[in-house]
Amino acid sequence: MSEFVKLIVGGKTYDIPVISGSEGEKAIDITELRKKTGLITFDPGFANTGSCQSSVTFMDGEKGVLRYRGIPIEDLASNSTFIETSYLLINGRLPKRKELNRMSVLLNDASLVHEDMQTFFQKFPRASHPMGILSSMVTALRSFYPELQILEEEINITVMRLLSKIRTLAAMSYKISRGHKVIYPRPDLCYCGNFLNMMFDNPVKPYTLKGDLIRALNVFWILHADHEQNCSTTAVRVVGSGRVNLYAAISAGIAALWGPLHGGANQAVIEMLSRIVKSGESVSGIIEKAKDKKQSFRLMGFGHRVYKTYDPRALILKGQCDNLLTKLNLSDPLLDVARKIEEAALKDDYFIEHHLYPNVDFYSGILLRTMGIPTNMFTVMFAIGRMPGWISQWMESIDDPRWKLCRPRQIYIGSNVQPYIPIDER
Ligand code: ACO
């Protein structure tokens, strides 16, 4: 039976339809609101706004649940690979062995980038942030790989190119920033192994791939692969709604992810923990500073727009950090401080009342550090992981007959009509 909410405007009652999702969430469908009532809704930051119907990812922020295409994140992190999870997100189901092998072949075929792109890299100032470089290079891919005539072929090839080349571009940007020789992708290595090899192999010190690092990287990227309508995914969908090419839409996602309130938080967490270790500042002092509204400081890696409990990805990453450090027989003072901060925050009234728990970025940087990834590459690592999510959400949007050009309205609060005053009379 159809459900409605009643809205009374100027004494007149309107029945506004309620729509439901497959997990029971409900939304008031306001698509006809302005036409019928002359009103719009006001929701800064879109905290109460469902922008689309989606079958990619389900999350329950109150219960700490995350599923890709219905499969719990915990199961994927334990059993899947990043490439299998990418297939799942993009195609809506797990691949058969033959399909997975075919995907690996396609990714290998697409792994090289045009040699002329290296010229671009060389011209960026050495101190450039890799996220700025990555975003520019992804847009530039369109110029190097012009549009194909058949739409389906164009989409399939572009998807494989993006998944494969982002990893090559990221490793290239790191090598060039260090003034080192670029290492090419190898067809005999898996996706994650290939990336680690391109990052760390060099002509005078060959890199030995370790199974534990490859597994940890798979888990890291699986956990970052999608997160429904977050800031960067929304950027991809919004920019894509203007019907730009997929490279440009993804590039917008990379730019959005760069911010410290979003994907850039993983870098900010390590910078914060390093400062604490270096300065010897007490954990209680940090907690007090984070609560003090007179200071702009926030506890990085804590809090989330949707999760009001422990982010399930943070829980898995915390375990991965312990596991990898033990296997490699290493220790990290930053992990010790992180654990102490978490312990103190989870007992603190302010954090409890504000529902502030560790998010995905709190432990991810420690895992990346253990792999040898430099801090300024952390957000790039997030971007590589998010690629299948951005792609699947974009594909869903272009197939959705209800997805329109994104163009919100506003409540104007500026001056009323004013005369133009000639410059000599002002
Ligand atoms: N430290 C201290 N206080 C915080 C924190 C924090 N990390 N996060 C939120 N708060 C407080 C705010 O001061 C505010 O308090 P008030 O209501 O008393 O004024 C309240 O909690 C709500 O904060 P908002 O910023 O309104 O919540 P929002 O949902 O917009 O923010 C966000 C979510 C941006 C993630 C926020 O928690 C934050 O800034 N966290 C730190 C940055 C971070 O870790 N970002 C990564 C998020 S995960 C991701 O994007 C991949």
Image: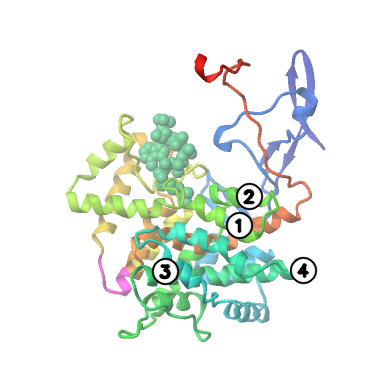
Q: In the rendered view, does 340 fall on the left or right side of 227?
A: left
Horizontal and vertical percent position of residue 308:
48, 42
In percent of the image, x 66 and y 52: which residue is there? 240
Q: Position of residue 98 (x, y in %)?
A: 67, 81
Q: Which amino acid type is shown beneath numbered disc 4?
A: Gln
SS at circle 3: helix
Q: Mark 1 = which residue?
A: 248
Q: Which one is nearer the viewer's eye here, 11 or 270?
A: 270
Task: Give the structural element (helix, strand or loop) at label 4.
Answer: loop
Q: Are marks 2 and 1 in contact (CB under 8 Å)?
A: yes
**Which residue is depicted at the point 41% across and 54% down?**
361
Query: Which tag, 4 or 2, sits closer to the chain's start?
Result: 4
Work out whether residue 140 or residue 150 is closer to the camera in this orientation and state it: 140
CA distance for labels 3 and 2: 29 Å
Q: Vertical placement of 410 versus 308: above or below?
A: above
Residue position for label 4: 149
Q: Is residue 356 above or below residue 68?
A: above
Which badge, 3 or 2, comes first in the chain's sequence?
Answer: 3
Image mark for residue 122: 3
The residue beneath circle 2 is: 239
* Quarter of the rendered structure image containing ligand 1: top left
Which element type, helix, strand or loop, lies under badge 2? helix
From the viewer's perspective, tell me whether residue 182 is left or right of residue 408: left
**Residue 189 position in % (x across, y down):** 49, 83
